[in-house]
Image (spheres, rainbow, N blue to C red):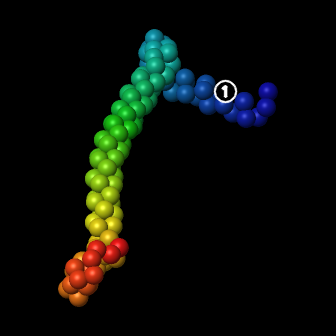
Amino acid sequence: MSPDQISVLTAIVALFDKASGWPIWFLFLLAMIGPWVVMLILDRNHERRHAAQRKMYENNVVLLEQTQSIAKDLKEIVIMNTQTSQKLTDSVEKNQFCPMVRLEKRAGGMQS
């Protein structure tokens, strides 16, 4: 045996020597049930973290749906602005708002 193993065994024997007032069934119960209790506590914490993560993903889905709705509205605004800009470009090219051009078109006939 290595010196480390001997020191561990010595510590365990010293622990049993100090715990001599305790019944052996209690030590056995502690050794057998203790890990199960620790695992139950860890499992409960894991379930809580998993529930929080699931809630985060559900919130992300709602956020994505809202973002898609905003993007659709913005797309409609861009289309409307493009159409308005095209109408403005057409009216500038045809000079409909200049009185001199309108008079010339009436006098000379429709010219494109």
Q: Residue at x 46, y 11 (%)?
A: 25
Tell me what residue is drawn at x 23 percent, y 83 percent: 107
Residue placed at 33% from the left, 67% from the top? Answer: 86
Hey, what amino acid is under mark 1? Leu
Q: Which image quadrant is residue 89 in?
A: bottom left
Q: Is residue 22 above or below residue 74?
A: above
Quadrant of the snapshot with the N terminus: top right
Q: Is residue 111 left or right of residue 106?
A: right
Q: Specify whether 83 is left or right of 32.
A: left
Which sits in the foreground, 101 or 35? 101
Mark 1 lies on residue: 9
Residue 21 rendering spot, x and y as whole percentages: 44, 20
Image quadrant in which you'd find residue 12: top right
The image position of residue 19, as x and y in percent, is: 49, 24
- Number of marks present in the image shown: 1
- Observer-nearest of 66 and 24: 66
On the rendered structure, is 88 left or right of 7? left
Against 47, is 25 above or below?
above
Q: Position of residue 24 (x, y in %)?
A: 48, 13
**Any part of residue 44 in sight:** yes
Residue 65 at x, y = what percent? 32, 43
Front residue of 2 and 104:
104
* Local secondary structure at mark 1: helix
Residue 45 seen by the camera: no
Residue at the spot 55% in from the left edge and 27% down from the top edge: 15
